[in-house]
Amino acid sequence: MSYQVLARKWRPRRFQEMVGQEHVLKALVNALDDDRLHHAYLFTGTRGVGKTSIARLFAKSLNCEHGVSSEPCGQCTACREIAEGRFVDLIEVDAASRTKVEDTRELLENVQYAPTHGRFKVYLIDEVHMLSSHSFNALLKTLEEPPPHVKFLLATTDPQKLPVTILSRCLQFNLKNLVPERIVNHLKHVLGEETIAFDEPALWLLARSADGSMRDALSLTDQAIAFGAGSVTENDVRAMLGTIDQRLVYRILEAIASHDGAEVLSASAELAGFSPDYAGVLGELISLLHRVALAQAVPEAVDNSLGDLEQVRELASRMRAEDVQLYYQIAVMGRKDLPFVPHAREGLEMILLRMLAFRPAGAAASPVPAPSQQSAPSPADKPSPAPAAPTPKAPAPEASVPMPAPAAPTQQPEPSQPAPEPIRQEARKPPAMQQERYSAPVMDEPPAMDEPPPWDEYDAAPVGAAPAGAAPVEEIAPVKKPEAAAAPQQAVAAVSEPASPATDQPISAQVAGGLAAPRAVPFGETYQPMPERVEELAPEHWIALVSELGLTGMTDSLARALSLEQVSATMLCFHYGAEQDALLNETQRSRIADALSNRLGSQLQVEYREAAQTRETPAQYSVRRRLERKAEAVAALKDDPLVQQIIEQFGAHIEEESVTPLDPS
């Protein structure tokens, strides 16, 4: 008798012999036992997972001479003929070779006739997705309402190609890929029945190479038996599959865990003797790192898939969890780079050397306390290799510290937070220049800045930035402007105006022609902070008041375009321009009035008039202050000694349009 391959010899004869697919078998067994049979079934899944086998078992159960049951006898004529593939009422159709609509019509012409020998006429259409669209259309009506003696069993590896009209007429069962453990257990049973010697690690190699297909696993086993002259050993299977010796992968990872670069390169050189697929080698290393991580997190989740359980546990005990995660990430990301390197071996070695070069943060050989936890070194301590002086940084904590009110007394800075501004900005300046530039009186705290000024690269102080204890940037007069230095000092929340109203020069002229001293308020007003008592409210307080109303969006923009002209105990009168007339509707007016009443704590009558504005609006104030700050910045930059020296030596000039003050508000 000729030899029969294992995949055909060990095809299941009963549902109980099927390996895996319990979710499909349970539904079919219950349908057969309860006589709740559908007329069309669709089995989907990748190659070799049991689609055709289940369809034949289902046909055998339908036509067994002992009755419809989930356990056919296997001995009657119908069962034997179906098993041998010669049952006349089981019509197996290969859709890949019969794709034309004429073939489908010829097939359907015989549907109306009763079965010749069995109880049901079963149409088993394999690779049904290969049918043409016309063939599907021809099949629709018969598939939806076939004669009672007809059952359709469809099988496909690509259900996405099936029309929805076909899918809606069938009961669909999705067969899953088999996990390696199930394949290994079945191979053990098969080889045990065949009395063939085998190594369990060899079966795991075959199961992983089968990639979820039982037919592929049995075919590879047939090949391994022939390769090993009647036995299945690990070395023979590795040679047959072209895989590397797994011990080299363990050796590489052990050398990485020991930070032994010479051993890593030695293992890589020995690995090159196999001429392996280096992407596959990296994949083996990734899988091993995954198993090590599992052994560290959930020890009971690690199986003895390759007989390496003890090695995996040993590696898990030697390596830190953060190191394993880092190595895994480096290997996964490095696998993407392998196609771009000149030689695959170089790519693998660079990935392994990268694992040696990088370590997780804080993974030093000897524990070193974090900078925030280190105390000041004593004179007897040995100096560390870190720089002696810390890199200057902006005083970030001050950004969240509330600024004092205008009337608050002067507060001394906390001992734990010395003011760093004089050290950072003035350490390289002669004392005379510091006194000349900053002549304003001392404030409680320096203004907070989000980041170090970009002028730290020069010897000159940054424009508009005052040292610790100096006045806010808005109050510091530019160099050679003694009249501005005499302006009244306010807190950061209340920006002071230049004191000299004599230089009422247009801002555009200042920016274009020398940027002289800032002009006075257009209508003779100055910025005034909100009074403590509502009775003291005056028109000049409107600029400060509008920022405290909590308005947003268009309502806030319209409020900032108003000028407060008249104030009384119960009434506020605002003027607005013609361009605001269409937008300042009743809804916007009521929102502004309600916000004023809530802020001032009393119900006020608010009047709006379209008339000439004799006082400065908050929007005009913001524009003017922005231009004035730019003018001050450019003037201070021109007066800077270092800038003047650069201009004289290199013939440079200042691009005034590119100058931006540190605090443009």
Image (cartoon, rainbow, N blue to C red):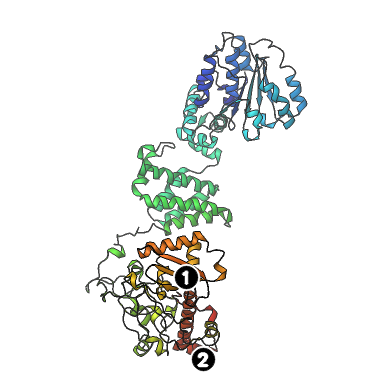
Residue receiving disc 1: 574
- Quadrant of residue 479 in the image? bottom left
- Is residue 158 shown to the viewer in this render? no
Q: Quadrant of the N terminus?
A: top right
Give left or right: position of 600 versus 43: left
Crowding around mark 1 (Cα neighbors within 10 Å: few <14, some 14 to 19, many 20+) is many
Q: Which of 17 and 146 lies nearest the eye of the viewer?
A: 146
**Secondary structure under the numbered disc 2 in the rendered image:** helix
- Is residue 31 shown to the viewer in this render? yes
Name the residue located 36 percent from the left edge and 46 percent from the top edge. 316
Q: Which of 177 and 496 lies nearest the eye of the viewer?
A: 496
Name the residue located 54 percent from the left edge and 37 percent from the top edge. 209
Crowding around mark 2 (Cα neighbors within 10 Å: few <14, some 14 to 19, many 20+) is few
Q: Are marks 2 and 1 in contact (CB under 8 Å)?
A: no
**Secondary structure under the numbered disc 1 in the rendered image:** strand
Give left or right: position of 179 versus 162: left
> Which amino acid is tagged 1?
Phe
Query: Looking at the rendered structure, which numbered label has been put on residue 648?
Result: 2
Name the residue located 44 percent from the left edge and 66 percent from the top edge. 606
Q: Where residue 245 appears, x then y in whole percent?
A: 48, 43
